[in-house]
Amino acid sequence: MSFQAYIENIKAKTVLSSAHFKKTAGAKGLLAKGGALKPDVKARQIVQWLKEDYGFRHGHAMAIYATFKGKTE
């Protein structure tokens, strides 16, 4: 599955955009000011949060993590 397919699938299933997840991650203290990941935040923390709170599988959680790292396509 392509990166874009993961993002579209997430939006179709949750009706939430990657911007929503970024905003929520910021509220949870996972992002620094400006929206970049804090240096001490690891992918596993993001994946665990998305699995627990949204029921994501690993690939979908990693796609959202990739958006936090700046990937757009």
Image (tube, rainbow, N blue to C red):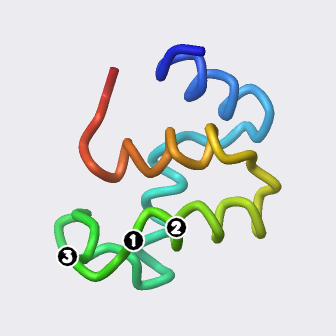
Q: Earlier in the sequence, mark 2 or mark 3?
A: 3
Query: Residue 42 shows which numbered tag?
Result: 1
Q: Residue at x 21, y 76 (%)?
A: 39
Callout 2 touching callout 1 (CB < 8 Å): yes
Residue 42 higher or lower than 61, as above or below: below
Residue 25 higher or lower than 29, as above or below: above
The percent position of residue 20, horizontal first and vertical second, equals: 53, 53
Q: Residue at x 74, y 26 (%)?
A: 12
Query: Residue 58 shows which numbered tag?
Result: none
Q: Label 2, on which residue?
A: 44
Count the marks. Answer: 3
Location of residue 66 by image quarter: top left
Q: Label 3, on which residue?
A: 33
Picture quarter with the N terminus:
top right
Picture quarter with the C terminus:
top left
The percent position of residue 11, horizontal first and vertical second, equals: 66, 32
Q: Does residue 13 appear to the left or right of 43 in the view shown? A: right
Helix, strand or loop at mark 1: loop
Give the distance between the C-alpha atoms of the residues marked 2 and 3, in whole angstroms. 21 Å
Q: Does residue 32 appear to the left or right of 45 in the view shown? A: left
Q: Nearer the viewer, mark 3 or mark 1?
A: 1
Give the distance between the C-alpha atoms of the residues marked 2 and 1, in whole angstroms. 5 Å
Tag 1: residue type?
Lys
Helix, strand or loop at mark 3: loop
The percent position of residue 42, horizontal first and vertical second, equals: 39, 71
